């Protein structure tokens, strides 16, 4: 999470690559079920609501699950509309910054707590 967000924030061509990859139906067909299964596993293993980092992990797990459901469930037209809204450069930068902050937080928790 940390390394990927640094690469995407530093290199604008990576953001363009993400936009291009989201247009491929074949990749969506493979990554959708994978993301859904990964989200289900994360929520099943770590669905702890409370205080601190455990809640942050739970929220990220639910976001992964919701993303997987949307990728699998939405038809091509609605998926394209969603990707067009998400693929704005400013929004991609904001998502990259959020991922960077979460990556730094998880790295700190993993190594120092």
Image (cartoon, grey):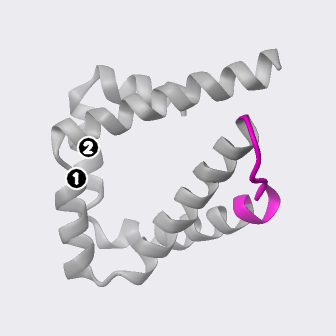
- Pick whichever, 72 or 24, lies toward us: 72
Q: Residues within 10 Å of mark 2 (few under 14, many from 20)?
A: few
Labels 2 & 1 near each other (Cβ < 8 A): yes
Q: Which residue is mark 2?
A: 17
| SS type, badge 1 | helix
Q: Quadrant of residue 74?
A: bottom left
Q: In which quadrant is the N terminus drawn?
A: top right
- Image: 28 above or below 77: above
* Spatial separation of the CA atoms under disc 2 and disc 1: 5 Å
The range drawn in magenta is: 42-52
Q: Is 79 placed left or right of 57 in the picture? A: left
Residue at horizontal 48 percent and vertical 70 percent from the top? 32
Q: Quadrant of residue 8?
A: top left
| SS type, badge 2 | helix
Residue at horizontal 59 percent and vertical 49 percent from the top? 60
Locate residue 17, reporting x and y percent: 26, 43
- Image: 32 above or below 73: above
Q: Which residue is mark 1?
A: 20
């Amino acid at each position: 999470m940390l390394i990927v967000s640094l690469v995407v924030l530093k290199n604008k061509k990576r953001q363009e690559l993400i936009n291009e990859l989201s247009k491929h139906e074949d990749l969506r067909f493979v990554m959708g079920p994978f993301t859904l299964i990964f989200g289900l596993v994360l929520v099943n293993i770590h669905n702890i609501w409370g205080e601190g980092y455990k809640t942050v992990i739970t929220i990220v797990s639910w976001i992964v699950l919701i993303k997987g459901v949307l990728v699998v469930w939405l038809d091509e037209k609605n998926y394209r509309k969603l990707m067009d809204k998400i693929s704005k450069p400013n929004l991609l930068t904001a998502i990259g910054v959020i991922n960077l902050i979460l990556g730094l937080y998880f790295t700190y928790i993993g190594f120092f707590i």
